[in-house]
Amino acid sequence: MGVNVGSGSSVSVSDTQSGNTVQDGGTLYVLNGGYISNTLDVGTVVVSSGGTDVGDTVSYDSNGAAQLYVLGTVISAVIDGGNAILGFSYVPSYTTGVGTAIDTTPATRVSQLAQPQHA
């Protein structure tokens, strides 16, 4: 059936979930071995190393753009007003790694940002 992550809530997935919704202010964590598909994201989705996200629509609402942080793999995501960021996440803490995006559109909305230099 999928998960519905409400505002102010967080849910972790380590199995297969399809037909998910992440509301503004909500966070969905896809853990190692987790697989989500057909997700409407207007909040935050964090795909950990070893996690997979297929067919995510990363959108926005009146409060701002959704965020998709990818340390695992994202396939066929549609970035429609939100942002996909490969290789690091600030949620729940600063983490770096290698993220992979396959057939994600538009590619111009997918960023692989340089890691900040720490003093």
Image (cartoon, grey):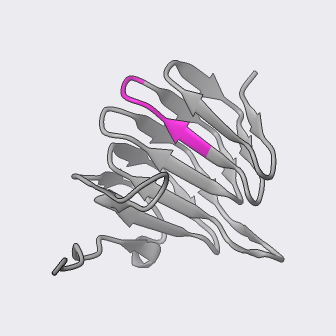
Is residue 111 or residue 55 the one in the foreground? 111
Q: Position of residue 74 (x, y in %)?
A: 41, 47
Horizontal and vertical percent position of residue 107: 40, 71
Residue 100 relative to residue 5: left or right = left
Query: Would residue 71 be found to the left or right of residue 118 on screen?
Result: right
User: In this rendering, would 8 be left or right of 97?
Assistant: right
User: Is the C terminus in the top left, top right, bottom left or bottom right quadrant?
Assistant: bottom left
Q: Residue at x 43, y 59 (%)?
A: 104
- Residue 107, placed above or below residue 101: below
Name the spot of residue 49 as percent of width and height, x first: 30, 39
> In which quadrant is the N terminus drawn?
top right
Reply above or below: 51 against 22: above
Task: Return the x and y of residue 24 as percentages of the image width and height.
Answer: 76, 60
- Vertical arrangement, residue 92 with respect to residue 19, above or below: below
Identify the residue at horizontal 49%, vertical 35% (top origin): 30
Q: Residue at x 43, y 31 (%)?
A: 31
Q: Residue at x 65, y 43 (%)?
A: 39
Q: In the rendered structure, which segment of residues is drawn in magenta?
A: 28-33
